[in-house]
Image (tube, rainbow, N blue to C red):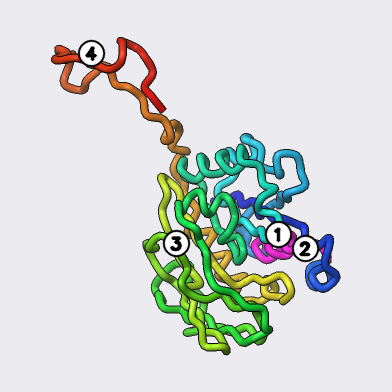
Amino acid sequence: MTIRVVVWGENVHEQENEVVRKIYPEGMHTTIAKGLDEDPVIEVSTATLQEPEHGLTEQRLADTDVLIWWGHKSHGEVSDAVVERVAKRVWEGMGLIVLHSGHFSKIFKRLMGTPCSLKWREAGELERVWVINRNHQIAQGLSDYFEFEQTEMYGEPFTVPEPDETVFVTWYEGGEVFRSGLTWRRGGGKVFYFSPGHETYPIYYNPDVKQVLKNAVKWAYNPAPAWAGIEKAPNTPADKAPNGPLTIKGETLHKRGEEGFH
């Protein structure tokens, strides 16, 4: 089994901010990809905002099993057409892993249907991530908790839909807590949000973070064929009903063979 993964990175802070560039000289997307590449089951490549169609053409997405998304400064520069293309692939069965400030990305808000807002603070404080769902596939190989000496605070309320599962809950030195690892299903696809990953700290080099992401890729992978046409609402004519041709009774809004309203 091979899981085809694309790590999508905004790749803006790495170009503009010296602190970020020193930590991630090849870009955060490359560091994340290298961590995943340690697992022989995962076949990983990268894409960035600056590429044509943001590196996410229809064919590229059709050949992707799991997409990982990191963005922050330039959410608004992501093409709406590409967002809809990614959403369609998630509905069809592609897995999506959204990282850190990707909570405000167009694709995450599109799939959640909520503001996806939260509280935040940059103070370089301690973060302790508690594993509260020990039997979950994403939590395998981890201890009771793991820590970052310095990080950005993300605090509740996190205005997302009630998750299917909560895997991690974070405590911060300043006293806030945050649901830092959440899962949902959208159509045929699985979605995982993981909050650690502020760009001015070397979080994506952390062994526990790399373990979480490897586990999450395997959890989000769907081996079934793409659920083609899931976004459509086709008319099933009376003469094609499962129990044989039906006699149409009463008035109808549409003429025979006419496409429905959208």
Dot in front, 1 or 4: 1
The residue lying toward the viewer, choosing from 25 and 116, is: 116
Q: Residues within 10 Å of mark 2 (few under 14, many from 20)?
A: many
Tell whether position 4 is magenta. no
> Label 1 vs label 3: CA separation?
20 Å
Q: Position of residue 232 (x, y in %)?
A: 41, 30
- Residue depth check, mark 2 versus mark 1: number of the one nearer the observer: 1
Q: Nearer the viewer, mark 4 or mark 3?
A: 3
Q: Of label 2 and label 4, which has the lower sequence position?
A: 2
Q: CA distance from mark 2 to mark 1?
A: 8 Å
**Residue labelled with disc 3:** 160
Give the amino acid type for the residue marked by disc 1 in the picture: Lys
Mark 3: which amino acid?
Val
Q: Residue shown at 56%/69% (left/top)?
A: 195
Give the quarter of the image for residue 33: bottom right
First in sequence, mark 3 or 2: give its number. 2
Q: Are marks 2 and 4 in contact (CB under 8 Å)?
A: no
82 displayed left or right of 185 = right
The residue where tag 4 is placed is 239
- In the image, the segment drawn in magenta is 25-37
Residue 63 left/right relative to 159: right
Instruction: Work out whether residue 16 or residue 148 is closer to the camera in this orientation and state it.
Output: 16
Distance from Cα at disc 2 to Cα at disc 4: 59 Å
Q: Position of residue 118 (x, y in %)?
A: 53, 69
C-alpha separation, residue under disc 3 versus residue under disc 2: 26 Å
**Residue 230 at x, y = what percent?**
41, 35
Q: Is residue 122 left or right of residue 253?
A: right
Q: Dot 1, crowdedness within 10 Å: few (<14), some or many (≥20)?
A: some
Residue receiving disc 1: 73
Taking the magenta stretch, the answer to whether it contains residue 30 is yes
Tag of residue 174:
none
Precedes in sequence: disc 4 or disc 3: 3
